[in-house]
Image: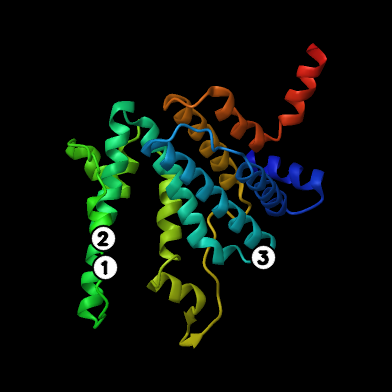
Amino acid sequence: MSGRRSKAQRRHATGKPLRFGNAEYALASAHRVLAVELSQVPVDRVTQFVVGWLRASFEQSKVVATLTLADMSPAAAPNRRCFIEIAMRLHWLHDLPQSDRAGAVDAMLDAEREQTLKTFDHLREMGWNEEPDFEAMNAFVLNVTSNGQIKDQARKFASAAHATIVKNPGPFRAWREESSYAHATGYLAGAYAPVSDDTMGVGRPHVLDPDLDAHRMMTVFVIMLTYRLLVEEGTDESLAMTIVDAFFDTHDDHSAAKNDSN
């Protein structure tokens, strides 16, 4: 079945535009995932990144879905960009040898610490008079990887995107396009104020995934990567599975099956 025909059939079955059905699915699944209790996940730097990225990605998914339902998809470019970046970072982390993951996320934290210091250098040059106390931040112990390639991947998103075993050109292209509309760029100015024959027009940024088909598939990708990473990092499989169950809304099915077996 062709993609176009499949979309048409799904639209006919639901009686609403496909983007609305996918947005409602994304919204409902995000609410379920964000409600999962994960306090018993073993705490280390890697699991903190995985759980934090999971929650952040589904918060972004909620915003993307909400703006889609409000016919404001072009304004969701920053949220789509963040969501895609998290998904691809999870993929990168998953494809690293387990022994390298802690050093890799510490390399990310080290880069962010450097950026914080540089930001306050800029502020001082702009006349900022307050001097923040960086003692606690600088005293925070990081075990940064000594692997130069992994350190580069931790600091540079494009390097991380190239590093995965299976490449993601589609999401990377989408991330790059969303980046064009997530900052004060010429692309953004031209999209909202197009000019033709010396006349200022009115426009909106292009939306690469208007029906949220790719977004819906990427939410599955995030869930499965999260599950695998948590299990590999020592989380009890049944606890990690609660995230999968919540996403697919299968808690009741599992409970019914258990009751039937009794």
Residue at numbered disc 2: 115
Residue at numbered disc 1: 119
Q: What is the secondary structure assignment of the residue under circle 2?
A: helix
Distance of label 2 from label 1 (alpha carbons): 6 Å
- Sequence-earlier tag: 3 or 2: 3
- Judged by depth in the image, the label closer to the viewer, 1 or 3, is 1
Q: Residues within 10 Å of mark 2 (few under 14, many from 20)?
A: few
* Residue contact at pointers 1 and 3, CB within 8 angstroms: no
Q: Where is residue 85 shown, x and y percent of the image?
A: 42, 49
Query: Is residue 116 found left or right of 259 in the rendered image?
Result: left
Q: Quadrant of the N terminus?
A: top right
Mark drawn on residue 71: 3
Q: Where is residue 158 shown, x and y percent of the image?
A: 31, 48
* Residue contact at pointers 2 and 1, CB within 8 angstroms: yes
Identify residue type, mark 1. Answer: Thr
Residue lying at 68% horizontally and 65% vertically, measured from the top left: 70
